[in-house]
Image (spheres, rainbow, N blue to C red):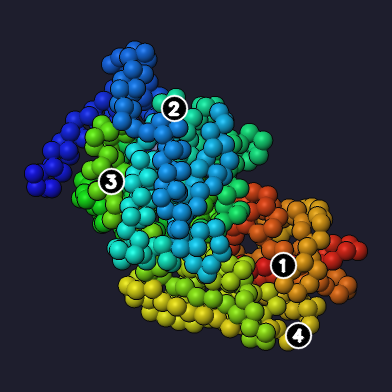
């Protein structure tokens, strides 16, 4: 049979079976609701599933049906065996590791694929996460297909070779093995893991103790590895979803994040490489802003972008959550080029480079920002390499900043292909104290104030040049966006530069232009005219400044 005929037949069967169990993967608003039940919040899809069940069948019948549908899918132990078998077969270009355990104690296995797995290199890292929702099992199957395909085609296929040689690809096939074995959306505690992350607008998940082990595992993972981009795989729709997922007023609206253009580009890489995603009637070009589709809160996608500089997409890879297992190979064919091209876009597009100091040539973990885009990424600590995803065919001014060094910027027109820009920064010639003073006349008159609420010294640590301290700081920004005046006292003591910026322990409570940050996380979205350095004095110990805020 011609491939196109196979696709056609399967497409029909996918549509048919979706009549039974289609429920929207991110949850909430549902476009194919047959039960007449009305949902108006983000917890809706679970209810919808049961509402449909009640409408059509008993819970018992429903479970039996799911068991039948799960036939041919890997069980959790099958999955573990498959991951280990993959690693056994491809140990020259892979390693496996667990990032933690589920509530019921199932290891969360990750496969890393690279020509130097487990080593730090000046390369971007990408992660795929499948099975966030237990009842969306297609992703975990696709990810095993992906890993094995790359393994089989390394040094044979240019795309496989490009990925292995230039990217560290980490694949977590199942984030929610318990939900999978229980055939339900949430984990064993019945928590929707894609609502369990800290949220930028609402404090609902800010309590560390109540966070689920699967969520904690992901959050700790991102402390260990810096991912440039990532995607989680869901089922129940066919679309590539990008930030923001939520809106501040809870209304369904297009809510662009600072990198809207770059995200639209990335999402399109996926949809356009897909067999039929971009042909969607519901979603123009097969992509959607999350909040425009329906807002969710506590999702993993926005958290990745806000707190770890990781550009994450939420991919809905199949209208039917439980297609017959015989359709999995076809679904892999549908998604294969999308998955490969998405990972490859990390090296085929965007701006990449390294940052060095001019005096001793040492790598600087500088901040990289783009004029006009309110978002900063960090160069890596080890090699000072950075990887900035951007929409092609635009002019950009790229700025590198590092405490103690003079910032540099350069303008480029980014084409379709990736561009390399290395920066060599000159040290500030003034002594540290005067550097601090300069910043205080950085035109922040006015109504608003930034107040240091609390300073709790932690153990000293060594920074690039000086002894510094880790702190837990609470800062408060009052009133509206606009000019800022810091109500932080200056001091006559000789300042020590602690590179303790937002990253290592800052809590900020914000209004308007500030985005809420959880302890130990950084994300600043502030309208300022230039670089700001917040000078904080800690009586008798040291001074600390918090810096790198850009318009
Ligand atoms: Zn989902």
Left-right relation of 468 to 368: right
Q: Identify the residue at image location x=51%, y=59%.
A: 117
Quadrant placement of the C terminus: bottom right
Query: Is disc 1 placed on a helix, strand or loop?
Result: loop
Occupied quadrant, residue 100: top right
Ligand 1, seen in the image, is in the quarter at top left
Nearest to viewer (mark 3 / mark 1): 3
Does the beta carbon at disc 3 come under 8 Å from ligand 1?
Answer: no
Please tell me whether residue 176 is drawn above or below residue 381 in the rendered image: above
**Quick check: can you spot residue 236?**
yes
Say whether disc 3 or disc 2 marks the residue closer to the N-terminus: 2
Query: Spatial distance from mark 3 to mark 4, Cα to Cα?
Result: 59 Å
Where residue 358 sits in the image (x, y, percent)?
A: 63, 86
Query: Is disc 4 placed on a helix, strand or loop?
Result: loop
Q: Which residue is mark 4?
A: 430
Where residue 252 sits in the image (x, y, percent)?
A: 40, 43
Residue 181, disc: 2
Say whether disc 4 or disc 2 marks the residue closer to the N-terminus: 2
Say whether disc 3 or disc 1 marks the residue closer to the N-terminus: 3
Does the beta carbon at disc 2 come under 8 Å from ligand 1?
Answer: no
Say whether disc 3 or disc 4 marks the residue closer to the N-terminus: 3
Q: Which residue is mark 3?
A: 332
| Mark 4 closeness class: few <14, some 14–19, many ≥20 residues within 10 Å | few
């Amino acid at each position: 049979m011609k491939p196109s005929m196979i696709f056609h037949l399967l497409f029909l069967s996918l549509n048919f079976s979706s009549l039974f169990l289609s429920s929207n993967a991110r949850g909430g608003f549902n476009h194919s609701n047959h039960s007449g039940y009305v949902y108006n919040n983000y917890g809706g899809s679970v209810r919808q599933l049961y509402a449909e069940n009640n409408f059509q069948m008993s819970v018992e019948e429903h479970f039996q049906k799911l068991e039948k549908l799960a036939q041919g899918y890997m069980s959790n132990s099958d999955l573990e065996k498959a991951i280990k078998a993959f690693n056994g077969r491809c140990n020259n270009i892979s390693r496996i590791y667990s990032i933690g355990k589920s509530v019921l104690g199932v290891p969360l296995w990750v496969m890393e694929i690279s020509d130097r797995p487990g080593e730090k290199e000046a390369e971007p890292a990408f992660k795929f996460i499948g099975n966030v929702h237990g009842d969306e099992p297609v992703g975990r199957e696709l990810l095993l297909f992906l890993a094995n395909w790359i393994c089989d085609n390394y040094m044979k296929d240019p795309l496989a070779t490009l990925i292995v040689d230039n990217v560290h690809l980490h694949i977590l096939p199942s984030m929610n093995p318990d939900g999978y074995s229980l055939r339900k959306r949430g984990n064993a505690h019945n928590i929707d893991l894609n609502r369990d992350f800290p949220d930028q607008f609402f404090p609902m998940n800010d309590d560390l103790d109540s966070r689920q082990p699967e969520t904690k595992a992901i959050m700790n993972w991102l402390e260990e590895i810096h991912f440039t981009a990532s995607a989680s795989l869901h089922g129940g729709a066919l679309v590539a979803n990008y930030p923001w997922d939520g809106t501040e007023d809870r209304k369904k609206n297009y809510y662009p994040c600072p990198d809207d253009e770059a995200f639209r580009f990335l999402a399109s890489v996926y949809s356009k490489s897909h067999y039929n995603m971009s042909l969607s009637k519901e979603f123009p070009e097969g992509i959607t802003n999350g909040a425009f589709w329906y807002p969710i809160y506590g999702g993993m996608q926005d958290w990745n972008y806000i707190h770890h500089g990781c550009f994450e997409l939420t991919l809905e890879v199949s209208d039917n959550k439980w297609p017959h297992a015989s359709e999995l190979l076809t679904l892999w064919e549908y998604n294969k080029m999308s998955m490969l091209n998405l990972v490859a876009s990390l090296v085929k597009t965007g701006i990449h480079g390294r940052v060095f100091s001019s005096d001793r040539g040492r790598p600087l973990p500088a901040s990289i920002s783009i004029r006009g885009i309110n978002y900063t990424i960090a160069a890596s600590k080890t090699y000072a390499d950075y990887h900035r995803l951007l929409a092609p065919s635009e002019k950009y001014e790229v700025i590198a900043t590092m405490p103690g060094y003079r910032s540099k910027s350069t303008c480029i027109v980014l084409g379709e292909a990736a561009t390399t820009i290395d920066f060599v920064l000159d040290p500030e010639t003034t002594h540290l104290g005067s550097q601090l003073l300069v910043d205080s006349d950085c035109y922040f008159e006015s109504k608003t104030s930034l107040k240091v609420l609390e300073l709790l010294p932690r153990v000293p640590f060594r920074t690039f040049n000086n002894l510094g301290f880790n702190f837990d700081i609470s800062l408060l920004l009052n009133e509206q966006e606009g000019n800022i005046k810091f109500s932080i006292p200056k001091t006559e003591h000789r300042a020590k530069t602690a590179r303790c910026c937002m990253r290592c322990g800052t809590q900020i409570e914000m209004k308007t232009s500030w985005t809420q940050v959880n302890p130990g996380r950084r994300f600043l979205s502030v309208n300022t005219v230039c670089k700001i350095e917040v000078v904080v004095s800690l009586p008798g110990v040291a001074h600390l400044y918090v810096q790198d805020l850009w318009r």
